[in-house]
Amino acid sequence: EPEVTQTPSHQVTQMGQEVILRCVPISNHLYFYWYRQILGQKVEFLVSFYNNEISEKSEIFDDQFSVERPDGSNFTLKIRSTKLEDSAMYFCASNQGGLSTDTQYFGPGTRLTVL
Amino acid sequence: GENVEQHPSTLSVQEGDSAVIKCTYSDSASNYFPWYKQELGKRPQLIIDIRSNVGEKKDQRIAVTLNKTAKHFSLHITETQPEDSAVYFCAAKDTGRRALTFGSGTRLQVQP
């Protein structure tokens, strides 16, 4: 069964550095998402992406965040200048879209640690 | 926006007993309610979901019920097994949005 994949599994960075988290959604899916989960807390929506543009974003997704689909398979989340509070697990998800296909499939996550 | 409350935060049951986890939501426009199971260090995995046009859905030992009037939905796990031990998250999605809003999670511990 196809799965969403993410790289790296763990990223350690210094405060103020830029990081890029990578995701490969399921191949026939049209909608892509990023969520984050701070340790011990709930999963929070960041952004959704469809047809090469952001379709929805949360208050968390401010100017330091950006997303891109640089080619036909990858979907990336860039954090421009990382802060300590950006430390979290970042999950990518995808789905086909449409009323009968709301199910979102999650990747294994990237644990981001900002020092 | 949508707000999802989930209870209890932790639940310990004996193997073979039933477990019930409850969620309430605030946005009456929400029409899709999935439940995810997350084992330690792993991805959230969908275990069951329900749409607002049905009141109950069952899949083997797992069932979900939805009360649209009261705006709450529940996960029921019967004949629990140690491998059911995990964190369970409920979520809700508004008709006009793509984002899932998650509850705070329930840590279920099934004692052998």
Image (cartoon, rainbow, N blue to C red):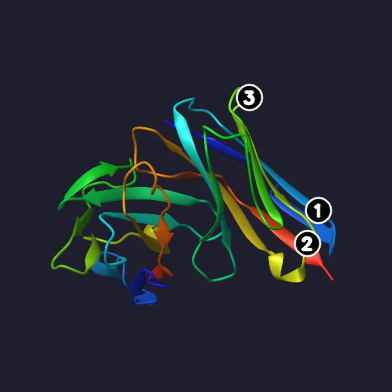
What label does residue A8 carry, if any? none
Q: Name the residue under label 1.
A: B18
Q: Is mark 1 on a helix, strand or loop?
A: loop
Q: How far apart are marks 2 and 3 (CA)?
A: 27 Å
Where residue B65 sits in the image (x, y, percent)?
A: 65, 39
Please tell me how crowded label 2 is: few (under 14), some (14-19), or many (20+) other residues with Cα within 10 Å: many
Which badge, 1 or 3, is on the more N-terminal residue? Answer: 1
Q: Is residue A89 above or below residue B95?
A: below
Q: Can residue B99 be seen in this view?
A: yes
Q: Are marks 2 and 3 on the same chain?
A: yes
C-beta proximity under 8 Å, tags 1 and 2: yes
> Which amino acid type corresponds to the residue marked 1 in the rendered image?
Ser
What label does residue B80 carry, if any? 2
C-beta proximity under 8 Å, tags 1 and 3: no
Q: Name the residue under label 3.
A: B70
- Who's the residue at 46% across and 57% down the image? A37
Q: How far apart are marks 1 and 2 (CA)?
A: 6 Å
Q: In this view, does A46 lie above or below A90?
A: above
Camera-side residue of A34 and A84 = A34
Q: What element carries label 3?
A: loop
Where residue B49 sits in the image (x, y, percent)?
A: 54, 48
Q: In this view, does A98 lie to the left or right of B31?
A: left
> Which amino acid type corresponds to the residue marked 3 in the rendered image?
Ala
Q: Is mark 2 on a helix, strand or loop?
A: loop
